[in-house]
Image: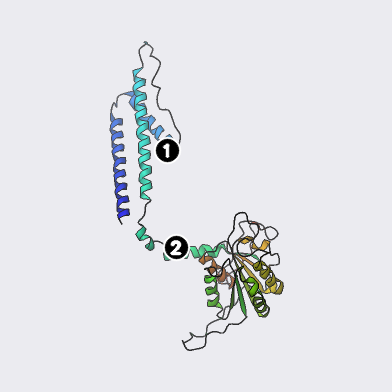
Amino acid sequence: MKTFAKAKGWTMALSAAVLLCTAFMQRAYAQDQDDPPSRVARLGYMEGSVSLLAGRRVRLGGSSSQPPDDNGRPNLGRQRFSRRACEIQGFARANRTACCLVVARARLADINGLDNLIAEPENVALAQKLSDDAITLVRENGKVLPLKAIKKSAVLLPYQAPQAIRNRVVTVIFSDDVRLESGRVFERQVRIRAPDAHIFYVDPRIAGAMSADVLRAVDDAEIVIAAVYAVPAPGVRGSGGAVRPTDLTGILLQGILDHATEKTAVVAVGNPYLARDFLGIQNYLCTFSTASVSETSAVKALFGEVPIRGHLPVSIPGVAQRGAGIERPMQ
């Protein structure tokens, strides 16, 4: 609050300075109303102010050494006009600087009140809508999407048996590190719609040890979802992030495609170039972001809860050109 009060005091002080400068200029312009050079100077001020705001340096009036008039006497009128023009130009520059300082000070915010501004419901709803609209279906074989959600019969009591895990829907989440938050929102959204889903988390450290269990579940599954979290990295060709063709995670993803490519939906959470390294993908969905709203949008699109109408903003070599996208209505 002290920072906010101090900033507010600076803003009021600078505003007062701008008003004083403006009043002083108006008083100076009101003098010598019958003097032609002063009227020309007022017009020059207007032109000079516009030029200064446009970032150009202009010359107002004559120079300090003007040629004599027709009678051979010094041209004092032009010299007085030149001095007045210089003063006006200086006032305009000072006025512009003061205005910039006022705007800069007005940008300060009370950091103690940020909790009341961030993540407001209307802002979150807008972010979710934008994320839903960005979902792009690049490839589809017509055999997987949309997925069917399981309707819950009743809420389980504390001592009742929990929902058994089956291999009807197998979800494999690829990330850089399974200890991080990547995939947690995706998992929750899948379990809301398919409580019996079998979900695996895989990263480069444990991909080799988990490959046998994952492929066994994939063989028994009706539907397979492979969610790959990858953020574009400078200087890294291909998918980047958690999955590369030569890594253990890439080998596992290729194994999933070899075992069940027709019933597998691959979701590129972040980097859309994943499919360039895995050309066998038949169902391919892109989110272009790893934010939590994008994870939610991806699951909603998989289950047909939102229309899919996105188009690629970039070309994926060997896969699709910029502007490609398969549109699907909400189911």
97, 49: nearer the viewer: 97
Indicate the secondary structure of the residue bearing disc 2: helix
Callout 2 environment at 10 Å: few (<14), some (14 to 19), or many (20+)?
few
Picture quadrant where residue 28 is located: top left
**What residue is drawn where x is 37% and y is 28%?**
86
Q: Position of residue 128 (x, y in %)?
A: 50, 65
Q: Which residue is mark 1?
A: 53
Location of the C terminus by quadrant is bottom right
Location of the N terminus by quadrant is bottom left
> Colour scheme in the image?
rainbow
Q: Is residue 297 left or right of residue 72?
A: right
Q: Is residue 87 left or right of residue 311?
A: left
How far apart marks 1 and 2 lie (CA) works out to 35 Å
**What residue is drawn where x is 39% and y is 29%?**
44
35, 231: nearer the viewer: 231
4, 248: nearer the viewer: 248
The mark found on residue 42 in the picture is none
Q: Is residue 45 left or right of residue 219?
A: left
Q: Position of residue 25 (x, y in %)?
A: 31, 34
The mark found on residue 123 in the picture is 2
Please tell me which of labels 1 and 2 falls first in the chain: 1
Amino acid type for the residue under numbered disc 1: Leu
Callout 1 environment at 10 Å: few (<14), some (14 to 19), or many (20+)?
few
Amino acid type for the residue under numbered disc 2: Asn
